[in-house]
Amino acid sequence: MPHFPHHYEDILALLPGIRPQQYSRTRNFTTGAVTRLSPFLSRGVISTRMVMLHLAQHHSYIACERLLQELAWRDYYQRVWQSVGHSINADMRRAQERVHTHLLPTALDKAETGIEAIDAAIRELYNTGYMHNHCRMYTASVACHAAQAHWLQPARWMYYHLLDGDWASNALSWQWVAGTFSNKIYLANQENINNYTGSKQTGSFLDTSYQMLPPSAIPESLREVVSFEAQTILPAVAHELQLDQQKPILLYNYYNMDPSWHAGTDANRILLLEPEVFAQYPVSEHCLQFLLRLAENLPGLQVYCGSFDALHTAAKGATIHFKEHPLNTHYSGALEARDWMVPEVQGFHPSFFSYWKKIQGRIRAQFSS
């Protein structure tokens, strides 16, 4: 099971361990050479650009191209979210077909889908906050196409448990599987699952040819549904903010925990946890505690649970600096850009590959060979 460090030095120490060629060959296998960087990318501790520049210093472009594409998918989904806002919470291109329920299949919640590799991956998710990306696709495919559930509630369930929860990557990946943000639906049969997970299951409802998928009838194990009701219990903060009004405020949140941001600045550092945001996008206690452990990398950080407006009032005119993010559109103050792989390529692109074509040359230029 994966262990994710929380000290910044230990996180940076993961970068030299990236093996891009092995990643390219084995990434789809649950035992593959994946980077394990996703929780730190999602929480903004490191950036896709930082990883790209590290790769450019130590590897060739050809060796890294597959990994660079995967990093670019993350930026692409964020650009979509940035462009369309909360519209990513509805079917983007077309309505999902064969929707029987808008609730969560109980089998996902209980890790009892009947597909052994998926159930094991769900248990790992509950225990560690991690699920291999291929298993995420398998889980989404079973939910959307075998259980005939609309993607939104299952996507919220998965996001709730993921340490690397990034709503753009999560929601739009589910939509890609569901066929609402792609040209076709994603299906996997038992042979495919066995191949990439090492399981040897036979006789399941997926143990058939692709021509027979998805199943015409909902399998018995997937028929029960439940409404996904979750909440985030924010920490009790017993003290008032201690602010030096002569210093600027650096504002951190669930998507920005970057210790290198204004590292040398003498400032008030505040981690803002807004109840309204976590009501819309709840995360588990496991995820929240991971965030608070990452907060230890920010000296003098104060945690504030409340609205931005209340914080703004408490700031009494002090300049508030924050990084741009789709969940920050109600912030006011000094807006700063995030670290994109290719910051000059902005806006909405209808597909990942239309985006990739525009950024590929600029990424390649960072490499000497």
Image (cartoon, helix red, strand yellow):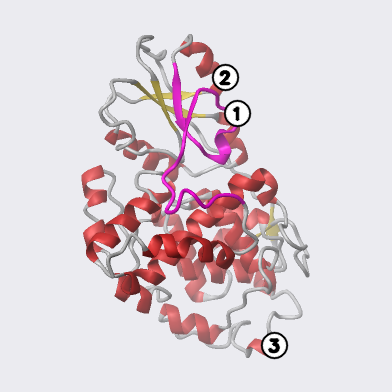
Position of residue 19 in the picture relative to residue 85 (left or right): left
Kindly report which numbered mark, 2 or 3, lies closer to the viewer in this rendering. 2
Q: Main secondary structure of the magenta part?
A: loop
Residue 113 position, x and y percent, is 58, 70
Q: Which mark is residue 155?
A: none
Q: Is residue 117 visible?
A: yes
Q: Is residue 281 above or below residue 139?
A: above
Kindly report which numbered mark, 3 or 1, lies closer to the viewer in this rendering. 1
Mark 3 lies on a secondary structure that is helix
Residue 273 position, x and y percent, is 49, 30
Q: Which mark is residue 330?
A: 1
Q: How far apart are the two marked residues, 3 and 1, measured between alpha carbons?
A: 48 Å
Residue 103 position, x and y percent, is 71, 56
**Residue that label 2 marks:** 309
**Residue that label 3 marks:** 212
Q: Are marks 1 and 2 in contact (CB under 8 Å)?
A: yes
Give the amino acid at mark 1: His
Q: In the image, what residue occupies the spot 52% across and 52% down?
A: 345
Pick the front one: 327 or 113? 327
Give the amino acid at mark 3: Met
Give the amino acid at mark 2: Asp
Q: How far apart are the two marked residues, 1 and 2, measured between alpha carbons?
A: 9 Å
Does residue 47 show up magenta in the picture?
no
The magenta segment is 319-347
